[in-house]
Amino acid sequence: LFGSMLQAHSQDSLYRFKAKGNPVITHKFTADPAAIVEDGTLWMYTGHDFEGRQKGYKMKDWCVFSTTDMQNWTEHPVPLKITDFSWAKSGDAFAGHVAKKNGKYYWYISTNWTGIGVAVSDHPEGPFKDALGKPLLTNEDCFASDHSWACIDPAIFTDDDGQSWIFWGNGECYYAKLKDNMIEIDGEIKQVKFEGFVFEEAPWIHQKDGKYYLTYASGFPEKIAYAMADQIEGPYEYKGILNEIAGNSNTNHQSIVEFKGNWYFLYHNGGMQREGNSYSRSVCIDKLVYNPDGTIKRVVMTSE
Ligand code: FUB
């Protein structure tokens, strides 16, 4: 059934596979997909759940995949590990997001306990190196939260004027400007004001037709919700649920990109037939469809 999973897969070589519906990746457990598009290639960066029955979110490295047609995929050698950050705690490789600026690729990663770090590379597939030797953001920057995983889930958005922003958080959604060097926060850290909806984690900003969309995980078990605004700093108006919890996982951390004329919703579930669950997650991808007024149709999560 899972043919691709049975082939030998070296950590040092390219691994090619064809997606056959959801989950898209079946040879290993992957989570928290974040994508960028460049020159006709979609690059997808994911977390990597351990094999075997886990009791928590414990990960030691991240993965990078590329495709030019959403069917034929290449996994590149492991580009970044939690041990590449000397200041991070073992097994703490939480969600991340890569952004390109000034010809370099910056990978913002989160850790449980220690905060958000940034690694840099000259190539989208890496290898990446810790750019700072210390966290970019810590729990102390998350002034309204007091738990170890308050400072997680970075998402980067670069606006039409060239200004890059970082959004992140658990329990509260924080945001700040990034300096042009992408490795320093520029000015004040602020919070998104939510009215009438609950923010859990996994913020993601994208823009379409002049509107800013903030998608995020809401509640626990999570559903992905979204809000819209005319400016990056809001006010954001709650628009509803984008997808329901399904597929045997408490989290489903999304990202959204446009690629070759289609919009895609990338997320994870616990749907893999070999022991999928909340801590053994699998990346899935579905198309995202807008209504004429700019609101988004619900994404029906493919069941396992
Ligand atoms: O993968 C670890 C954590 O679980 C992420 O940082 C959260 O968004 C949730 O998916």
Image (cartoon, grey):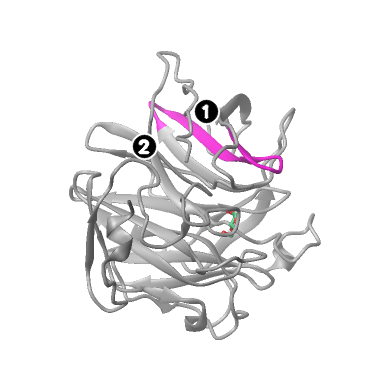
> Quarter of the picture for ligand 1?
bottom right
In the rendered structure, which disc, 1 or 2, sits on the residue that comes first in sequence?
1
The residue under the point 34% across, 63% down is 64
* Mark whose residue sits in front, 1 or 2: 2
Q: Is mark 1 within 8 Å of ligand 1?
A: no
Residue span colored magenta:
208-225
Q: How many marks?
A: 2
Asked whether 219 falls inside the magenta stretch, the response is: yes
Q: Which residue is mark 2?
A: 264
Q: Residue 148 appears in which quarter of the rendering? A: bottom right
Mostly what secondary structure, the magenta segment?
Answer: strand
Reply above or below: 137 against 297.
below
Q: CA distance from mark 1 to mark 2?
A: 22 Å
**For the residue marked with disc 2, what is the amino acid?**
Tyr
The residue under the point 63% across, 31% down is 235
Asked whether 278 falls inside the magenta stretch, the response is: no
The residue under the point 47% across, 41% down is 304
Reply above or below: 129 against 218.
below
Q: Which residue is mark 1?
A: 230
Give the x, y percent position of residue 286: 38, 35
Identify the element where label 2 is drawn.
Answer: strand
Q: Residue furthest bottom?
A: 86
Left-right relation of 106 to 147: left
